Image (tube, grey):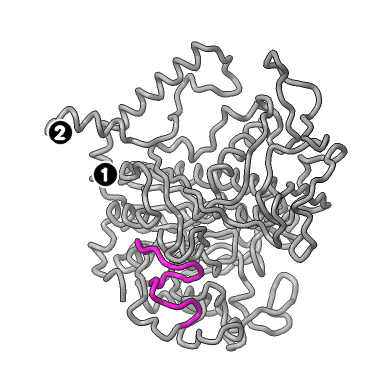
Amino acid sequence: MKNIPKMATCALALSVTMSLHASTNSLDGATIESSLSWYEQGEQSTEETLRLARKALSNSRRRAKNIILFVGDGMGVSTVTAARIYDGQLNGNPGEENRLFFETLPYQAMAKTYNTNQQTPDSAGTMTAMMTGMKSKAGVISVGQDMARGNCSNLSGNILTTALEHAEEIGMSTGIISTARLTHATPAATYAHVPERGYEDDRDASKYDDVSGCTDIASQLIDLKDRYGNGLEVALGGGRKNFIQRIEGADPENGGKGERLDGRDLTDEWLDGHPNSAYVWNQAQFDAIDTSNTDHLLGLFNMSHMEYEEDRAYDTGGEPSLSEMTGKAIEVLEKNRKGFFLQVESGRIDHAHHAGNAQRALMDTIEFANAVKKAYEMTDPKDTLIIVTADHSHVFTIAGYPTRGNPILGKVIGNDSAGSPKTNPQLAKDDMPYTTLGYTNGLGFADLAVGGDTRYGEPSAAGVRTDLTAIDTEDQGFHQEAMVPLGSETHSAEDVAIYASGPGASLFQSTVEQNVIFHVMNKAGRLSKRSGLTPIK
């Protein structure tokens, strides 16, 4: 940094956007708090920021051998905050002082999430921005914003090259992981190109008038090897129905039908099309995989989305956790001396929020953080760029004035005039208690034996208050109240956070457009420079 003017050095230091970095005196459940301890913690954090600023230039110039993009679907700032507290409380601490692992990564920024045609975005348009470097419309998968949704007539000239395709073309290994269907919007945007996110298998063509010029998303996953490199090395998630035939007995788990009408069994095609390949659909098969002898691994663990982390133990065939899938994927991918690109999505954070079930959203966020930690520990931060972000947020709120350490899923219990915790929950103007967590819109209150998204199609209970006095709001089946009655809670338009470490991570500073995420990956990995592929074809 000897050639950088002092003022520039100071500006660089001040502009590094980061979370409070870990230190030996960080405030956690084992440290006694005092006014002085807060002062010392802040001083140490600032010194760490200055140290990182001095490293920033060398960090940005180093090439990333490996790139891992983690996407918490729907993981807005309020979700991160609530999950941080919930995780801390599950470990016996007040919770507010806790940090999820990805919050300890040294560089941070904020991303603007709007689509080119929507103020509040969807996952297809946002992931397209992250994977191609170009924003696009809601509902379209890695195609340009000039395309009409659901119309494939002008696909040529509107195909946007993805980071994964660049990586394949230069010989890197590639992988995708999702707790949603692998044909769902977020993972699909890494390898597929179609102006309708719902075109997941060939049977879906009957739902749309103008998709005949496109190939369904599941087929594009299998056929990637015919377009770029040797295709995906790892694909793990849900969505088995989109890969198998619509005949009785096609599903190995329950004997049911798949969705494909074209006579193709894409799981067989995966095995036939790749050397040293494997296909698994349950936990036992997954655990038995010898990664040293497996070069292409396909895992489809559910007919539709995988289970929520809360419910995973009850799945019929058994499902691996997100962190287990991440670890297994890295073991396969890291064998390539040219490096790898891996995208990991926690897809069901989003679904739990849509159902108004905060507990499952937070549990999946905590497991998402575990997966990031697993990846960080299995790779070298000197050659691996790790990016953790969200595609969009939700209308999920943390409100009231609960006392420190009040259960984040509980009813609000405030402090008295002396600043000490009260005994009983606060009452609203209607003389009923209320919860810290809530939703602006959605189906509203429910107290079910099993939570999650089993509520779709039920009458909305939003817009009215419920007496929660005798209700256990911390139970997994509790669904928070909502103000505006809708059939499903919606996304929100607020910015989302970016957390990063490794080569190129220091390029994340301030508030950026979401498509900048691609450009940081591209710059750090020298992807398009080495692949020679054009951004649009």
Residue 320 spot, x, y in % from top left: 62, 55
Residue 219 is one of the magenta-drawn residues: no
Horizontal placement of 6 versus 124: left or right? left
Question: In what element is the residue under mark 2?
Answer: loop
Compute the Cα span from label 2 to label 1.
15 Å
Are the two marked residues, 2 and 1, in contact with CB atoms closer than 8 angstroms? Answer: no
Q: Nearer the viewer, residue 465 or 331?
A: 465
Residue assigned mark 2: 4
Residue assigned mark 1: 60
Question: Please, is residue 163 above or below residue 418 in the view?
Answer: below
Residue pictured at 44% horizontal, 30% vertical: 20
User: In the rendered structure, which segment of residues is drawn in magenta?
Assistant: 132-151
The residue sitting at the front extreme is: 429
Of circles 2 and 1, the one toward us is 2
Residue 22 spot, x, y in % from top left: 45, 28
Q: Amino acid at mark 2?
A: Ile
| Quadrant in which the N terminus is drawn | top left
